[in-house]
Image (spheres, rainbow, N blue to C red):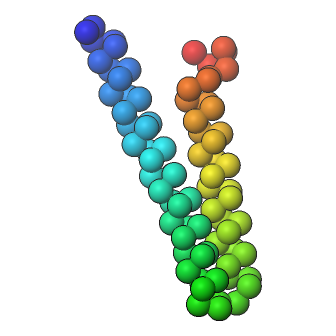
Amino acid sequence: MGVEQAKEEAQFRKVEGAMLHVEDAARRLAEAAEELKRDDAPDYLVAALETAAGAVRADHKRLMKSVYWPAVDAR
């Protein structure tokens, strides 16, 4: 394996690690929303967490697309 390939693989590992954190955050937000629902929490708190989970999932999707399917000009 060449130096450039090793460098690129290390960079991708960092990005993939960050993406796992984003995915985990979305899951935790959704779980917290479900927990609040079970505890009969106010609707606005549940909605806030559900909205945040959806936004984080959308960010994760956008990040994946930009990493794995970058625009031709980006490379």
Residue shown at 64% from the left, 48% from the top: 59
Which residue reaches farthest top? 2
Asked whether, in this view, residue 5 is left or right of residue 29, the answer is left
Of 34 and 75, nearer the camera is 34
Where's residue 39, x and y in %? Answer: 59, 90
Q: Quadrant of residue 52?
A: bottom right
Where's residue 25, x and y in %? Answer: 51, 60
Residue shown at 55% from the left, 75% from the top: 32
Where's residue 8, x and y in %? Answer: 38, 20
Residue shown at 39% from the left, 42% from the top: 17
Where's residue 23, x and y in %? Answer: 51, 52
Asked whether, in this view, residue 2 is left or right of residue 50, the answer is left
Of 2 and 65, nearer the camera is 65
Q: Quadrant of residue 44?
A: bottom right
Q: Is residue 2 above or below residue 31?
A: above
Residue shown at 65% from the left, 90% from the top: 41
Q: Is residue 19 above or below residue 46?
A: above
Image quadrant for the N terminus? top left
Q: Quadrant of residue 9?
A: top left
